[in-house]
């Protein structure tokens, strides 16, 4: 079986781990907050690098505080837990490192339950990589609001970052396919 020139090699997902670049992308995109905030309307409080739970498993509450070092440790621990469930959810599926990193980034943001029920996962399980990439664009809502909505021709101020992040993931995903 040959692959298209310029398209990265795929490896069984069970044999992959989040790359350092993938980890940095997640924490960079999440941004850091020393004090817990509600990032978008009707969302859960987050602290550090988008953590909704502390390392001990207790939920983040408004007013909770962290340090950059503790926030990195919490993010790494959270991602490691998500990553185990993520790999198991893709039996026999081969991914590029870039695909692995971006779908795990999605799982960090939206949670394992949403990943498990997603059309992205279903499409990957049947080897339909392009449809899996395109399914990323279905995840454009936060707090009951369509984050892709323009207001007077401009990005909305409610949750445009959610939509922007999905478009960025989609573009990276297509690039992994050589498209």
Image: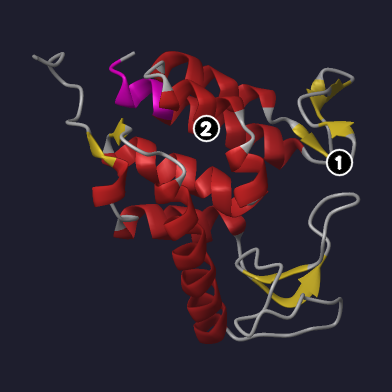
Q: Spatial distance from mark 1 to mark 2, Cα to Cα? A: 18 Å
Question: Mark number for residue 117?
Answer: none
Magenta residues, start to end: 173-178
Q: Is residue 128 above or below residue 18?
A: above
Q: Secondary structure at mark 2?
A: helix
Q: Quadrant of the N terminus?
A: top left
* In magenta segment, residue 177: yes
Q: Is residue 28 above or below residue 70?
A: above
Question: Mark number for residue 168?
Answer: 2
Please give the residue where the numbered disc 1 appears in the rendered image. Answer: 158
Between 174 and 94, the residue placed more toward the observer is: 94
Identity of the residue drawn at 75% across and 36% down: 160
Q: Residue 172: percent from the left, percent from the top? A: 41, 30
**Label 1 vs 2, first from the N-terminus:** 1
Identity of the residue drawn at 65% across and 68% down: 51
Crowd tier of the residue under label 2, counting other residues whose Cα lies within 10 Å: few below 14, some 14–19, many 20 or above: few
Between 112 and 31, the residue placed more toward the observer is: 112
* In magenta segment, residue 142: no
Identity of the residue drawn at 82% across and 61% down: 44
Q: Residue 25: percent from the left, percent from the top? A: 44, 53
Q: Is residue 3 above or below residue 72?
A: above
Choose top left, top right, bottom left or bottom right for residue 19: bottom left
């Amino acid at each position: 079986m040959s692959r298209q020139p310029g398209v990265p090699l795929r490896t069984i997902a069970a044999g992959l781990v989040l790359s350092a670049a993938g980890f940095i992308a997640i924490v960079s995109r999440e941004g850091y907050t020393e004090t817990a905030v509600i990032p978008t309307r009707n969302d859960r409080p987050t602290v550090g690098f988008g953590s909704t739970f502390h390392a001990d498993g207790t939920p983040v509450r408004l007013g909770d505080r962290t340090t950059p070092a503790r926030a990195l440790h919490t993010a790494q621990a959270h991602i490691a837990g998500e990553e185990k469930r993520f790999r198991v959810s893709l039996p026999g599926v081969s991914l590029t490192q870039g695909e692995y990193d971006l779908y795990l980034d999605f799982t960090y943001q939206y949670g394992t339950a949403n990943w498990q029920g997603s059309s992205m996962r279903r499409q990957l399980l049947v080897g339909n990589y392009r449809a899996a990439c395109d399914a990323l664009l279905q995840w454009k809502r936060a707090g009951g609001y369509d984050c892709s909505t323009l207001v007077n021709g401009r990005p909305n101020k409610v949750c445009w970052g959610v939509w922007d992040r999905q478009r960025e993931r989609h573009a990276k995903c297509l690039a992994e396919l050589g498209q």
